[in-house]
Amino acid sequence: MYQRGFIPLPWLAAAWMVIVSGCGPRHSADPGGSIQSGDGRGEVVGSSLQSISAPSNSWSVIGGLSWARESHTATLLPSGKVLLIGGTPRPGEGSATEIFDPETKLSLLGGPLVEMVGDRAFHTATLLPSGKVLVAGGATASAELYDPETRTSTRTGSMAEVRSAHTATLLPSGKVLVVGGYGLGGAGSATAELYDPVTGTWSPAGTLAAPHRAHTATLLPSGKVLVAGGATTAVELYEPQTGAWTSTSALDVARSWHASVLLPSGSVLVVGGEVAGEALATARVYDPAAGTWTSTGAMASPRAHISATTLVLPSGLVMVAGGRDYRYTGSERGELYDPATGTWMLNGSAASRGTATLLPSNKVLVAGGEADSFGVRMYDLATGEWSSSTVAWTSSRYTYTATRLSSGQVLLVGGLDARGMLYDPVTRTWMSAGYTVERQGHTSTLLSSGKVLVAGGESYFYTPPQQLFDPVTGRWTYLAGMTMVRSRHTATLLPSGKVLVAGGLTGDYFGQVTNTAELYDPETNTWTPTGSMALARSSHSATLLPTGKVLVTGDGQNTPELYDPETGTWTPTANTLESFFIYEATVLPSGKVLATGSQHAELYDPETDTWAPTGSMVASHGGAYTTTVLPSGKVLLVGGGSSLAHSVELYDPETGTWTPAANAGFIHSQHTATLLPTGEVLVAGSLASSVATIMLYTP
């Protein structure tokens, strides 16, 4: 099924066409074939996800983050999962929170925050003894409590000042000390506040000797807090027992955007940062007993913005897994510091403005950042090796087909991309399915043999040939050509095993709409004409009914037709109640057909050849959305071509009503939605977003 509508120019065609999965009960996809031999079971290019524990009515991202986060926070939860909050630049309706599971490599969308000021970046997130997370500041004075169990956030008391790039330290008392940061107008703050989780209120915690912004705060074994730098050389100590601030030995330079960690010896390492826009490679060690600083080895590369990617490993080594150099570009390599020798060594890749989290599995999770904004990487402390978990492709893909194979795997073809892809829902892996040809406006049909017929379509430079994909061998072969060149047609697998191809455009983007139809016989590899429709149609819908006949609707016309494979003829059916643009026609478990378009819906009963009204959708989705029948019998509608394309709805055939479902997090348009054997729905691609995210919906 393709997006309905006018294609104004060839170079804009991709912006207005979509093909959705042809393997569900609502309509089948199509034939085709062109050759490109190769092993379709080739190199794994995605993530391995072997189990899932997502809650019902939820969305998860496969093998990465839901959007390109940087300047976010990452909080290790008691469950061993990692909560990511905020960051920049947040795309439209992108989820403010997500919970990444290092075991399954699924990132569960975590719901909205109470307040999203800008992108809620350069804030703090502190895990409280209760298990909730205190989210404070980020160009605001507001604070809220996020509950990972319910994935909801509630307001709590606000700070006295607007703060960003401040610090938040959990004290032994359970209270949280917030210090400094950028205030209104970008001025540095010299004040501190205490948050009491019991009362949900803030109280003053004294005034420092100097303003600190983009500084560090380190909890010492004595219970004191060491605040260092932040566009100043001043270093100060906070005593929680008395609430007093005292100055200690100053830093060598006025660092900001640096990192500090508590070493096993009880000393504090301060490293990197910047002064007047120039990144630093130097490091200093603070001795709390003597109150003095000493120099130690310098990093191989100058780095700033490294506070969230610097941590102490169980071995006592210090990892710096990110940063920006003096040219304000991301540093390409991470580094390890040995406190025993005071030296550094290079160690794998880095992520500027990302986060690094030490996991209970003895691995380090690096998430987001400019170098790999919506990918995640793992560092295995046992082997010293890095691994990457990424989406199946690195740029947005749309106008392709998704076909569920007999094995349960999903084959992705086209979208102006010559690469075929296979998704395995059992192992949660993406694999190459070899190279085919670039095409859009084509169809993909699962044949009775288990092979996939890819037929027709458009390309900028040539007419795509018909192809056959064999999942057993992973090879593509050419097939006989159709009786005419077609794109934006429909292809339906008939009970006989033959494939009915109907309508579409003849030729390229400027082709004529046709009413002709033809049959493909997989046994003889031949195409033969069959009866023509009464009306010429393209970008329409073709639905196989329980009777074996095929219902054709759409293309802006309220005059559906029925194809009878026994006679090879078309007959008109009753007209729809209203003249509306049918985008999807979905067979329900009852045998009736749910026809939808924009915000309108009707039901067709094949037994009585009548149309009946049913509930209207909650929002107008335009076109380019998908409808999928779930195991429960309900219908999942995702995305669309309207301004509300981020919305998701569920249709209940028992009540004839639509209700909102969990938000998918960002706009989906001209994507595909495929029901997996697990009962989950694989949603992939989108024209409306540059994000290459591939998601799972759990009913």
Image: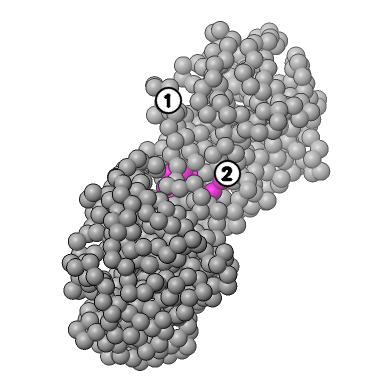
Image x and y of residue 41, in percent:
29, 45
**Residue position for label 1:** 385
Tell me if residue 397 comes above or below residue 485 in the rendering: above
Q: Residue 522 lies in what quarter of the image? A: bottom left
Residue at 29%, 72% in the rendered image:
492
Residue 69 marker: 2
- Quadrant location, the N terminus: bottom left
Disc 2 residue type? Arg
Is the magenta region chiefly helix, strand or loop? loop
Q: Is residue 431 left or right of residue 227?
A: left
Tell me if residue 569 comes above or below residue 637 in the rendering: below
- Span colored in magenta: 61-69
Q: Is residue 453 left or right of residue 553?
A: left
Whether residue 68 is in magenta: the answer is yes
Q: Nearer the viewer, residue 96 or 385?
A: 385
How many residues crowd mark 2 within 10 Å: few (<14), some (14–19), many (20+)? Answer: many
Tell me if residue 425 comes above or below residue 186 in the rendering: below
Q: Residue 15 lies in what quarter of the image? A: bottom right
Q: Secondary structure at mark 2?
A: loop
The answer to whether residue 388 is seen in the rendering is yes
Residue at 75%, 38% in the rendered image:
182
- Quadrant location, the C terminus: bottom left
Q: Nearer the viewer, residue 515 or 654?
A: 515
Disc 1 residue type? Glu
Measured in 3D between alpha carbons, the distance from the residue under mark 1 to the one under mark 2, in whole angstroms, is 24 Å
The answer to whether residue 469 is seen in the rendering is no
